Amino acid sequence: MSYPKDLTSFKAFKETRAMTMRDKIRAVADLIRLSKQYGTLLLLLPTLWSLMLASEGRPPLHILLIFIAGTFLMRSAGCVANDMADMDFDRFVERTKDRPLASGRLTRKEAFGVFVLLSLLAFFLVLLLNRLTVMLSFVAIALATLYPFMKRITHLPQLFLGCAFGWGAVMAWAAVRNTVEIPAFLILVANVFWSTGYDTIYALMDIEDDMKIGVKSTAILFGRHVYTLTFLSFFLTVAVLGILGMYAGLGWIYFMSLLLALALFAYQVYMVKASPTRQTAFKAFVSNVVVGAFILLGLSLDITLRGL
């Protein structure tokens, strides 16, 4: 690299380098959706359900912190993998055309470096847990890496997303109990239905662009039955969580939280159907964080009060 020799040119060179570095940092922040953490919360909530249940309401602090940090890192890595896979598609979708890779603010090589760094940091955290959890983490990495390509293969990528987002619940159970039992898999199954519901709503934002460029989704597959089948996905989420409650011997507080969740799910579908706009679909999608938090609250209160 050649450097300018006179003082004025050198100052201009330094300012340009500083601006470029700031631009790259902003681009990386956009790449990992740093200002949009609803995805992290949707990934974290089923993990917290599992942690609370496996530990009977008293998750070890170090395990809790590891999963919170690990969830942020893996969700960020998943965003990078998604944008790398969708780089050529994103340019033609109104909502995604300004993403760092699609707009050229970052190169694929730079994005891959970010992905590797995030994955290594997440794996380092997992190494602080027991051997079973470490082994299960390889499945998590595989799911996060493969998910972005599913929308090219099948109209059911949401099911794969549910597995990727629900696998944290299996790892959390293993981290606490050093085994994997039925409740962890019930949370995984519930999350598959939940992700199918909320990601179908999310896919409605891009359905016209996706149909043009050949990207597959349940929003396209369900067609004119999209609202009915989306609510069915939410209903099955609550049904499986109800089975979980009965299996684990949970009480009325938990089941009341499930009824509230079902009512909120119904309102989401009604809202999107009554006003089928991108803005409404996005609001309904994000509101799933509130639903998941209510379930966590009901679960936590039920376990805590039962133990008093």
Image (cartoon, rainbow, N blue to C red):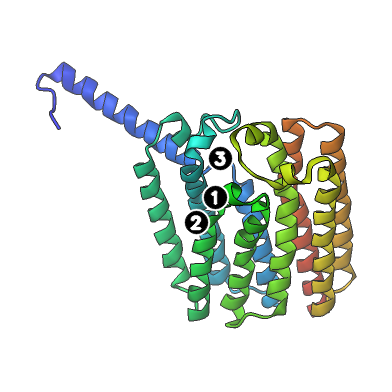
Circle 1 packing at 10 Å, graded few (<14), some (14-19), many (20+), is many
Q: Residue at x 39, y 55 (%)?
A: 116
Q: Which residue is mark 2?
A: 145
Vertical order, 67 against 205 (above or below): below
| Upstream in sequence: badge 2 or badge 3 | 3
In-image side of 120 versus 17 (left or right): right
Tell me where residue 134 appears, x and y as whole percent: 48, 74
Number of numbered discs overlaid on the protein picture: 3
Q: Residue at x 80, y 32 (%)?
A: 276
Q: Which residue is mark 1?
A: 148
Measure the alpha-carbon separation of dots 2 and 1.
7 Å
| Residue type, label 2 | Thr
| Upstream in sequence: badge 1 or badge 3 | 3
In-image side of 299 versus 144 (left or right): right
| Residue 187 location, quadrant | bottom right
Q: Which residue is mark 3?
A: 35
Q: Say which quadrant the C terminus sits in.
A: bottom right
As drawn, the label of residue 61 is: none
Vertical order, 131 against 217 (above or below): below
Measure the alpha-carbon separation of dots 1 and 3.
21 Å
The residue sitting at the left extreme is 5
Secondary structure type for disc 1? helix
Residue 231 or residue 177, whichever sits in front: 231
The residue sitting at the top extreme is 8
Vertical order, 177 against 293 (above or below): below
Check contact, mark 2 vs mark 1: CB within 8 A: yes
